[in-house]
Image (cartoon, grey):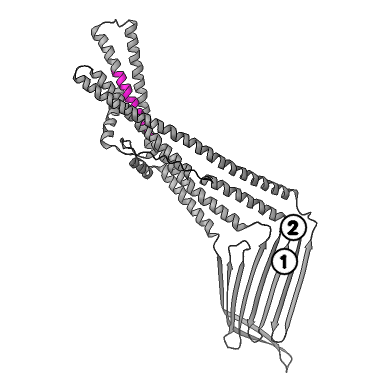
Amino acid sequence: MKKALLIIVVSLFALSSVFAVSLDDIINGAKELSPTYQNVILSYENSLINIRNLERKDKVGVAVSASVDPLYEKVTVTRNPVTGAMDEEDYKGFNASSSATITLPNDGKTTITGGVGVTTLYDGSSTATSLSLDASHTFDFTGYSSSTSDDLTLATTKYSTELSKSTSELNFEKSVINTVSAILSYEKNIKKAQKSLDDQKSIVEKMDTLGTYSKTSTTYLNAVNVLNQLQASLDAAEKQYENALKSFEKVSGMEWTGLDEIPEPVLDLKIYDNGNTSVLISSLKAEAAVESYKAEAAKLNPMNLSISGKVSGTISDSSSTTISGSLSYTGDNWSLSATPGVTITKDKTTPSLTIAGKWSNGGTISTSDEDTLTAASNKMISAQNDYRDALSSYFDEAQSLSLRVLSWEANYSNAKASLDYAKTVYENEKVMLEYGFSTEKDVKSAELNMISAEYDLKTTMLEGLSLERDLKIFAL
């Protein structure tokens, strides 16, 4: 079983060198095949639908209605001047009406409604047309703005959606990179474990061939024990490698075929005075908490002015026009309203005016209302504190990332220097072997050191690419 697994591992190494692809190809392929990443895209699309629904609320609202009655019936009752009896006449006609209401997306919810109606009798004896137009608006002097609150909600949703999508994408790329790095590390461990095992096997085989030590001697038993430990280490490395391949397939949705090309990391740390998108979202939430507090305060201490006006009339044998309006002001415990109007006909003009007021001692404000306002105030202060903490954490993270970049650059420089040294030693060992000053074992050891240094450089570059994603997330 162990030999079969070793053959599989060796075969995978051979295939890797033939079918190896670049890291960019692996990441792009993983995005196409991974269900995890596809769910990220679906979640993003659903969030965009939610944003479009929020944006629709800010549009002008229009409602239109119409009705037609082709069987309109008009009954008139008159007294017969001769007999004194009541005569009833039945007229057939046509009636149609329509109206349209426009609601503007502002704080006062300005509403404008227009209507028209036509009634005509089929015998042509009477035709009447009615027209109406009215409008209303409310001014709020408390400082609360519902449109501002809606705008903050929309902006927060937009920024959060884009930030979540971009962060999820970069974290997915990191998971692929880290899995690839783990595979390379286990490949290196297998090669080193195999080399140590082969060397120890040679030692034990020489002992058996030369017979220099009895099989019951401490030296021989110790050599066999070391051999068994090295075999166990190789088995563990092969198992780890197998698990890493399964993890890669789960994360990327594809089989591992090796890594051919790794791009150079670009470690550009961008720092903004006002922070990144996460800090911006915290500031928007703080502003939204202020608006929520204003909304609760406006409920307990209202100060608004409502105005409306209406013009209606009929064009017929007895035409008339009515103009009316209303004006009301509401305070925290009082209100005052005035309703003027005038009706104009052919014969006369009739004005009207109604004034009303109301006052209370404020006893309608309950303890629960005051508690609600206090809770809103606490949330506002808490949100403002969260924003300051977010800004402070942003600069702390910037400092931490700066140190990570410096540390990686040092590790990268050391990894390149180690590889250059290992290559030089390997070339020297091959030359010395030609002249008889070295052995095949020394050459193989130098070669393994060179391969290990190559793996170390690759994993260091992958660490840099993972760090590059962290810097991009920080800059979002």
Q: What element carries label 2?
A: loop
Question: Can residue 433 be seen in the rendering of this structure?
Answer: yes
User: Given the current orientation, which residue lies at the most extreme bottom position?
Assistant: 82
Q: Which residue is drawn at 35% across and 14% down?
A: 226
Is 328 positioned to the left or the right of 108 in the image?
Answer: right
Answer above or below: position of 341 versus 428: below
The tag on residue 332 is 2
Q: Which residue is drawn at 62% across and 43% down?
A: 385
Stretch in magenta: 179-198
Q: Where residue 72 sits in the image (x, y, percent)?
A: 59, 80
Q: What residue type is labelled 2?
A: Asp
Q: Is mark 1 on a helix, strand or loop?
A: strand
Q: Where residue 197 sits in the image (x, y, percent)?
A: 31, 18
Answer above or below: position of 263 versus 79: above
Q: Which residue is drawn at 71% across and 58% down?
A: 302
**What separation in Å lies between label 2 and label 1 (alpha carbons)?**
14 Å
Answer above or below: position of 136 versus 445: below
Is 278 positioned to the left or the right of 462 in the image?
Answer: right
Is 354 positioned to the left or the right of 122 in the image?
Answer: right
Looking at the rendering, which quadrant does residue 320 occupy? bottom right
Looking at the rendering, which quadrant does residue 73 occupy? bottom right
Q: Where residue 58 sits in the image (x, y, percent)?
A: 55, 60
Judging by the rendered image, the residue that carries numbered circle 1 is 328
Q: Which amino acid does label 1 sit on?
A: Ser
